[in-house]
Image (cartoon, helix red, strand yellow):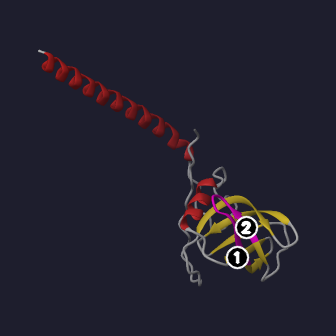
């Protein structure tokens, strides 16, 4: 089984009107408007809104369905447009579990690479050796504990039958 890693960047402090803290990520998903289905890239995400990037021509006020991991279709409305990037608000806040699932499924090779507000990329290659050694340690401790329990049972059985 492959482990999932998430890069969670703290958002930059800004003087904006956002109600919820946004998480920076890069996640490719599908969006369905009234006429078509298009690929979009989520650049940041909160329970109440998100920033997407796409070649599709969304207009201000347009409503579409965004397909999020573990949640499915979530209706959102475009509230801001800047070239290929669109600021959107969800029509109803999405559950925190949907944000967590999106963060876990997000791409980590470029860690939101070309975002102007993205933080420095994390080297995830360092985590794997530590995980392997901790797994070996866990296995060794489990074997040692099992051996102690087995010796205790054998000692208890020999005392009972003597």
15 vs 144, nearest the viewer: 144
Q: Main secondary structure of the magenta part?
A: strand
Q: Nearer the viewer, mark 2 or mark 1?
A: 2
Q: Quadrant of the C terminus?
A: top left
Point out the tag, 2 or 1, that comes first from the N-terminus.
2
Query: Which residue, as the protein is rendered here, is positioned at the far left?
Result: 162
The answer to the question of whether label 2 and label 1 lie on touching residues, with beta carbons closer than 8 A, is yes
71 vs 86, nearest the viewer: 71
27 vs 145, nearest the viewer: 145
Assess whether residue 134 is covered by the magenta stretch.
no
Query: Which residue, as the protein is rendered here, is positioned at the far front?
Result: 161
Taking 4 as reference, is 40 above or below it? below
Which residue is tagged 2?
66
Taking 58 as reference, is 162 above or below it? above
Rendering coords of residue 84 (x, y %): 80, 70
Within 10 Å of disc 1 (Cα), the crowding (few <14, some 14-19, many 20+) is many
Q: Quadrant of the N terminus?
A: top right
Bounds of the magenta segment = 65-77
Rendering coords of residue 146 (x, y %): 31, 28
Alpha carbon distance from label 2 to label 1: 10 Å
Which residue is tagged 1?
88
């Amino acid at each position: 089984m492959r482990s999932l890693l998430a890069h969670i960047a703290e958002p930059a402090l800004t003087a904006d009107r956002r109600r919820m803290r946004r998480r920076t990520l890069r996640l490719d998903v599908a969006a369905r408007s009234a006429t078509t289905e298009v690929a979009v890239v989520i650049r940041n995400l909160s329970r109440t809104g998100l920033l997407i990037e796409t070649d599709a021509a969304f207009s201000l006020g347009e409503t579409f369905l965004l397909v999020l991991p573990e949640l499915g279709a979530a209706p959102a409305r475009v509230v801001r447009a800047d070239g290929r990037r669109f600021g959107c608000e969800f029509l109803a806040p999405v559950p925190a579990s949907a944000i967590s699932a999106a963060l876990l499924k997000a791409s980590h090779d470029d860690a939101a690479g070309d975002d102007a507000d993205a933080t420095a990329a994390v080297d995830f290659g360092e985590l794997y050796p530590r995980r392997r050694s901790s797994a070996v340690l866990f296995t060794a401790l489990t074997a040692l504990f099992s051996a102690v329990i087995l010796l205790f049972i054998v000692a208890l059985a020999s005392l009972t039958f003597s």
